[in-house]
Image (spheres, helix red, strand yellow):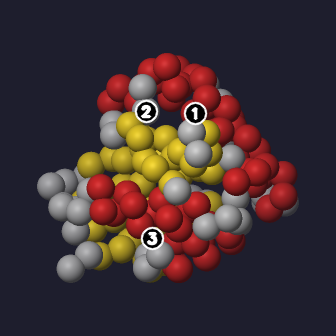
Amino acid sequence: MLKLIPASIEDAELITRIKTDAYDDEMERFGPDHDISEYWGPQWYSDPNESIKQITQYPCYKMVVDHEVIGCFWLREIGADVVELEDFCIAPKFQNHGYGYAALIEMEKLFSDKKKWVLGTPYYSVRNQHLYEKAGYVKIGESETKFAFLYEKLKS
């Protein structure tokens, strides 16, 4: 059973490794055929100091199954009723087992006071797009750079 547990600074190295493995795997398997380094790159997701910053400044969670950390995410509160999902990552060996969908449902329960959820995902992340749409998110546009599709989910 999947559990969402608040991350601590002691988790920063593990969270950084999960993000690095997940983003590198996705880039290798599905990445674009042109250079995107001007707005995407390992400099921000492979730095443990960035994970420490996220853990100390935002609600940051690890996803745990059978006492093993399989993924992570953090949330940026945009307003009283709006939250942005950031760095939603699952270690490659745990992908395609339903954990992403379960985590989305559980985080919405955990933050049930939020009426609007927003996120962005790279245009080449077809699996992520499918997951978000399955969980009720609707594509509302794309980023200025055309790198990411933007999604939102409205709760009643």
Q: Is residue 75 above or below residue 154?
A: above
Q: Which residue is mark 1?
A: 15
Can you tell which of label 3 and label 2 is closer to the viewer?
2
Q: Position of residue 39 (x, y in %)?
A: 61, 46
Marks 2/1: CA distance? 9 Å
Q: Which mark is residue 152?
A: none
Callout 1: SS: helix
Q: Residue at x 52, y 78 (%)?
A: 133
Q: Mark 2: which secondary structure?
A: loop
Q: Which quadrant of the figure contains the C terminus?
A: bottom left
Is disc 1 surrounded by few (<14), some (14 to 19) or many (20+) residues within 10 Å? many
Occupied quadrant, residue 26:
bottom right
Q: Are marks 2 and 1 in contact (CB under 8 Å)?
A: yes
- The secondary structure type at the circle numbered 3 is strand
Amino acid type of the residue that numbered disc 2 sits on in the rendered structure: Ala
Residue 48, image x, y percentages = 57, 23
Q: Nearer the viewer, residue 64 or 44?
A: 64
Q: Closer to the N terminus: mark 3 or mark 2?
A: 2
Q: Nearer the viewer, residue 64 or 78?
A: 64
Left or right, 91 with respect to 112, comes to: right
Badge 1 amino acid: Ile
Q: CA distance from mark 3 to mark 2?
A: 25 Å
Alpha-carbon distance for marks 3 and 1?
A: 24 Å
Q: Quickly name the residue at label 3.
A: 151
Image position of 138 (left or right of 81): right
Number of the front mark, 3 or 1 = 1
Which labelled disc corresponds to residue 7? Answer: 2
Please report the residue visible at 57 percent of the width from the left and 39 percent of the height from the top: 67
